[in-house]
Amino acid sequence: MSAKILALITSALLLAGCATTPQKPPTANADDMAQIKLAEAAVSVSKSLQELAKIEMATHPAAKIPPAPNPYSIGMAQLASVNWNGPVEPLVRKIAQASGYKVRVIGKTPAIPPLIYVNAQNTPLAEILRDASFQVEKKAIIALYPRSRVIEIRYLNT
């Protein structure tokens, strides 16, 4: 009898070893979920920025920018390469020196001066000055007087 029981237990164990375990459906790992959430957030931010741009365009219609003056007529046709990141006034002084102009400052220089970034290669000095002028328009006005050869920086009290 014990031989029959032993044979029965052995065959049961062998059959149990051949049985397959139920497989779980694959689940997304944490990295995949994070990437999906990140992509969704990026799309949401992009849509929000587009909406903000539309609102900005509606509240502030595009200003008409006057055409740039002819660099030759104002004596600022010299080509220069500039990589400037810092206060506007030292750059204006360098442009004035290179073109034979003088700088006149009106108003008190703010404790934190208007900062600009200009990266120009072989560009007329007039265009470099115009770029700087656009960047500081809410903090200062840069005016050019070719007849008296003066560049004027007017700091705004903001």
Image (cartoon, rainbow, N blue to C red):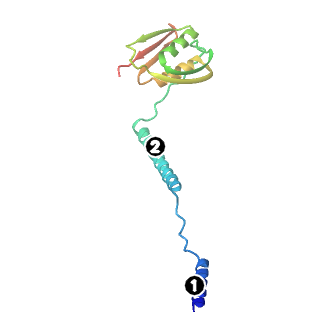
Tell me the kind of residue under disc 1. Ile
Q: Nearer the viewer, mark 2 or mark 1?
A: 1
Between residue 8 and residue 20, name the one nearer to us. Answer: 8
- Kindly indicate the quadrant of the structure image that contains residue 127: top right
Q: Secondary structure at mark 2?
A: helix
Q: Residues within 10 Å of mark 1 (few under 14, many from 20)?
A: few
Q: At 47% from the left edge and 22% from the top edge, which residue is drawn?
A: 115
Q: Secondary structure at mark 1?
A: helix
Position of 138 with respect to 39 (left or right) is left
Residue of label 1: 9
Q: Which mark is residue 49?
A: 2
x and y, in percent, of residue 83 in the image: 58, 22
Q: CA separation, marks 2 and 1? A: 71 Å
- At horizontal 44% and vertical 42% (from top left) the residue drawn is 54
Name the residue: 47% across, 44% down: 50
Percent position (x, y) of residue 123? 61, 21
What's the residue type where badge 2 is placed?
Leu
Give x and y (percent) for residue 67. 53, 24
Q: Earlier in the sequence, mark 2 or mark 1?
A: 1
Which residue ends up furthest to the left in the rendered image? 157
Quick one: which residue is furthest to the front in this view? 2
The answer to whether residue 108 is left or right of residue 19 is left
Q: Quadrant of residue 158?
A: top left
* Quadrant of the image occupied by residue 71: top right
